[in-house]
Image (cartoon, rainbow, N blue to C red):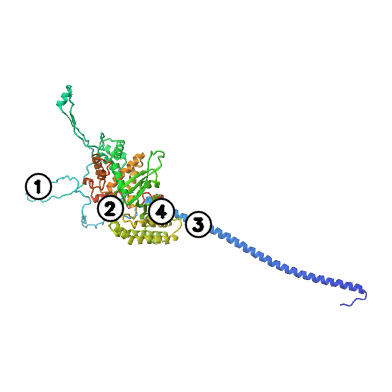
Amino acid sequence: MSRRPADISREQYEALADRLGGLERALAALAADNEQLAADNAALARELERERAESAARTEAAVAEAVAAVRAEMQAAIDSQAGENARLVEQFKLLQQGYFGSRSERVDPSQLSLFNDCEAASDGSPEPVPEEGAPAPARRRRGGPRRVDMSKLETVVVEHELAEGGRACPACGAGMREVRVEVTRKLRMVPAHLVCEEHRTHVYACPACCDANAAGEDVPASIARAPRPAEAFPRSLATPSLVAWAIEQKYALSLPLYRIELSLAQLGCGVSRADLSNWVMLAWERWLARVRDRIRASILAGAVIHADETPVQVLREPGRSAQSKSYCWVFCAPACDNHAYDYVYAPTRSGDVAAAYLSGWSGTLVTDGYQPYFSLGPGVTNVACLAHVRRRFAQLARLAGGDAAAEAAGGDSRLALDGRRMVDRIFRAEDAIGDVGPDERARLRAADVAGAMGELESWCRAMLPHATPGLKLEEALRYALSYMPYVRNAVGEGRAELTNNRAERAVKPFVVGRKNWLFSNTPRGAEASCGIYSVVVSARESGLSPLRYVEWLLEELPLAGDLDDPAVVDRFLPWSDEVPDRCRVTDAQTDRLRSAQEEPIADVDPGRLREDE
């Protein structure tokens, strides 16, 4: 302790000392507070820096998250747009192919170009140009038999002889003798012509009885009229030949009535289309309907039926507008049975039509993928068309420009090509079976065809995850997976075919005719047209001339007796042994008639496949 000054009292000194101690303690406290504040400031600074760092990190993360979300949204939009663009491009190519490309699924090398028949008939190689001064090359003679069979044609002989004065030898003047006759056959067209048949029925009377009757005696005047056979169209200008010709023109050659009317006018006879229509309707309702009913009974008596349908327009249908769409349904027997085809008119495409037609029938029904066919009850076993499965893959493979281009393109094009080839493998296995009976065919299918079908189904299931969603390949794979179980139903039924081409080919004559005559006026006319198609197509497929067959029906049915007896009408069915030979055509002519009406099956209309299935 410092020494107390002399001039300060003890009490003052101690008071000052206490005061100084208090100041020192206050200073120490302030120093301690200052240190605490400095520590707090440092902590606050650290906290502020941490908050700033966390805020910056949160801001950066939020910005990154927002940017990522925007990028993801934009990428999704780009992917969606790219998928939509790919779908539209694919759809455009399919439509372009449908309208401008080949409708056939296989190339027929014998088919000529539509506008370049002469060029298509040649081999396409340019003619060699001979060098100047070189002799002209000898014309190559084409060998082989003639393509036209003239053996059944009327032959008119035209002689080409030297005149009597021109037979002297130019060297010595002696007369020349004939050593041979060179025969060259040509075809000459004799235009059709109409003949007026004047039927004169002679009437006879007894002069004595007539004179006695005239004199008032009670004696009847005996008069007898020469008998005339029953006619299909009594008291009418029409004859079986004329009506059969009109039916052939419209239903076999697809000409509308106004063109048939024009043809008759050019032959010098003005028969109106109203008369033609009435004659055809009369032929149908009185005579041909009986034959169609037995054709239908034959189809329903079989174990396998093919079915298809196509639109038709009927203008005056009660309760419906003229623009309403009606339908012609086709039911036919398989190739191993008779050539029976039945066309049925219905105002709707409802499955009730097929259900009503097949009511009470049980068996195997071969169709496309139209769903009402697959809900006809437990007695019907459905077989789906394998050609429809192939068609979807084949369309996509063709879009790439052919097999080689599809292989090079890869992706969906290559997968579509692989799918089509796997279906082709099934068809090759079926073709290898050959012409055998139904039971043997079922046995061989179980051994060979069933395995190829299982491979296709497994491949489709494995490839589905690799297909681009929303595009046609995914649709083709899903379609195959949906209908292959129904395709496999054909394995155990040797009468069933793997495709519905039989019914689809039968639709084509109706479609070709519809494109010419466009519509039916009334339901009665539509029913008659469908019924006559049943008779005409069944006759053509049975190897008959529709013209001569229908003419024979109209000549003989009025003389046949009780047409309510099925056994009587069965004698007139196209496959009956009682059909005369004059109604038959050769196998070559039958094939030519069929090839003129048919092509390898594709869709009749470009958009029809999607509409059906």
Q: Residue furthest front?
A: 218
Identify the residue under disc 4. Answer: 93
Q: Amino acid at mark 3?
A: Ile
Q: Is residue 254 visible?
A: no
Which comes before the other along the chain, label 2 or label 1?
2
Kind of residue sitting beneath label 4: Lys
Q: Earlier in the sequence, mark 4 or mark 1?
A: 4
Front: mark 2 or 1: 2
Considering only order in the chain, which callout, 1 or 3, is on the residue closer to the N terminus? 3
For marks 2 and 1, give the CA distance. Answer: 43 Å
Mark in front: 2 vs 4? 4
Question: Comparing marks 2 and 3, which lies closer to the viewer?
Answer: 3
Instruction: Identify the mark at residue 121; answer none if there is no mark.
Output: 2
Q: Are the residues at dot 2 and dot 3 in contact (C-beta closer than 8 Å)?
A: no
Q: Nearer the viewer, residue 111 or 198?
A: 198
Q: Would you name the residue on which mark 3 appears? A: 78
User: Between marks 2 and 4, how big is the CA–CA gap?
Assistant: 30 Å
Q: Nearer the viewer, mark 3 or mark 1?
A: 3
Answer few, some or many: residues within 10 Å of disc 3's Cα (few below 14, many 20 plus, some between 14 and 19): few
Mark positioned earlier in the residue sequence (2 or 4) = 4
Mark 4–mark 1 CB contact (< 8 Å) = no
| Total tally of numbered discs in the picture | 4
Residue at 84%, 71% (x, y): give it.
22
**153 versus 126 height, above or below:** above
Q: Which mark is residue 167?
A: 1
- What amino acid does circle 1 point to? Arg
Is residue 456 or residue 76 the one in the foreground?
456
Q: Position of residue 406 (x, y in %)?
A: 39, 59
Query: Residue furthest toward the top?
Result: 216
Residue type at the position of mark 2: Ala
> Label 2 crowding class (10 Å Cα cut-off): few <14, some 14-19, many 20+?
few
Residue under the point 70% across and 67% down: 45
